[in-house]
Amino acid sequence: MIATFKARLGLLLTTLVMGSALVISGVSGYLAANQHAGLVTRAEIELAHQALLTDLRLSRFTSEPRSTLLQRVYSTLRTRGCTYIGLADDDSSWIVRVGVATDPAFFPIRVEPDPNERVEMLKSGVHARLVAAMPGSGRPGRGARLNSKRSPVRREGAKFVVMELISGDGTEVLARASRDLALALTSAFILITTSVVFWHLSDASEKAGQHMAKERARNALQLEKDRQLKVLGQMSAVLGHELRNPLASLKGHAQLLLEKLEANLRAHYGLRTIVADAELLESLTEQILEFAKTGAVRPEPTAIERLLADVVKSERFGVVEVAIDKRISSWSIDRQQVAKALANLLRNARQATPKGDPLHLSARPDQGLLLLEVSDNGEGIAQDSIDSVFDPFVTTRIEGTGLGLAFVRRVVEAHGGSASARNDAGGGGRNI
């Protein structure tokens, strides 16, 4: 079992490590792809910026209006992912704008002197904004503002250029990395889930196997007990029959001699002893025969309240407190056999209870079965005897035969139930 547990634990840890490696690999790949997409986007927007500046320089030799020129350049650069181009003058007024900006009221504009710092990433490595000063316009101050409320077209020279671009190549790289990350996470989830499910299934299978092994052992033990009881019952029947006739003859002749001899003779005392011992042996023989005959039961609807009342009145058990659950009125049982079994339990309880203390007899339903309990306030059952108290010929009393509780168990098991005994926390025993 320990080896199996270690094997399952090793498999679980291996799959956890593999799943973690897949997750780390997927996340690392996605982060690297995001960084690569950012570099590609920066390069593309810089190239688009250079293309725009080239066209603006060439426009000095033509009479093409700047708005027309910017629209033409935008149409060309849009195939490269450009989404917005704007030109502004030095007093923060837009000269001309084309396309759709992420933030149309974008101001103030900050123009960094370092070309590497003039590109701002707007979204996940594929959407960028470039803000740069126009060549030959002088170095503008930091934090120059563009007033979007001014007229959209002015004739003065442009001082700033603003561009936005969504990289197609960067988007493709990022999309591929996202798919790889999703695949890695899904694979890790499936791997770890499968491992956990396998752990639970194998654990459940192992427990089921252990339970089945215990059940087989218990069934084998029960079969062996049943076989022993059967042999014991057959032997008891033969022994009882063989003893009954000689005992009856012995007792009868002793009683005849008692009637013929004078009462003052010394032999008279010996004959009375013989008769008393013969009667004791007859009682033992009857118990043996009764135990041997216990087997098949004949269940029939029986009024439980009446049954318990008759059992209590059948012998001098003293004070017996009876409690019956109102949910039961009748039950299908062998009335005669169950009555004898309850009488045996009450007799044992009375022998173990201080004189004058009450006994307790109760009946209630329990998971579709009838639960009958007899309890007392005595010293309880010795711990080393609880497991064997229902075995034949097991008794702690000198004059006992040890067949009373064995008879109880045979009757209960013949009804499809089980008999058990325990000690109450406050003292006394309880037979169920």
Image: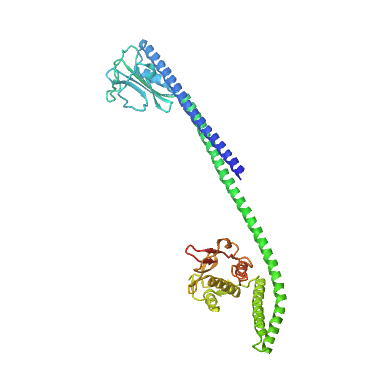
Which residue occupies the foreground of this view, 231 or 81? 231
The residue closer to the viewer here, 385 or 419, is 385
Residue 401: horizontal and vertical position, in percent?
A: 63, 71
Residue 171 visible (yes or no):
no
The answer to whether 323 is drawn above or below residue 154 in the figure is below
| Drawn side of residue 182 relative to residue 417, left or right | left
Colour mapping: rainbow
**Residue 275, horizontal then vertical, whole percent:** 66, 81
- The image quarter in which residue 152 lies: top left
Q: Residue furthest top?
A: 61
155 lies left or right of 17: left
Asked whether residue 286 appears in the rendered view, the answer is yes
For image coordinates 56% across by 39% down, the residue present is 12
Q: Is residue 353 left or right of residue 282?
A: left
Which quadrant, please, contains the N terminus?
A: top right
Q: Position of residue 396 (x, y in %)?
A: 59, 67
Residue 14: where, in percent of width, then height? 57, 36
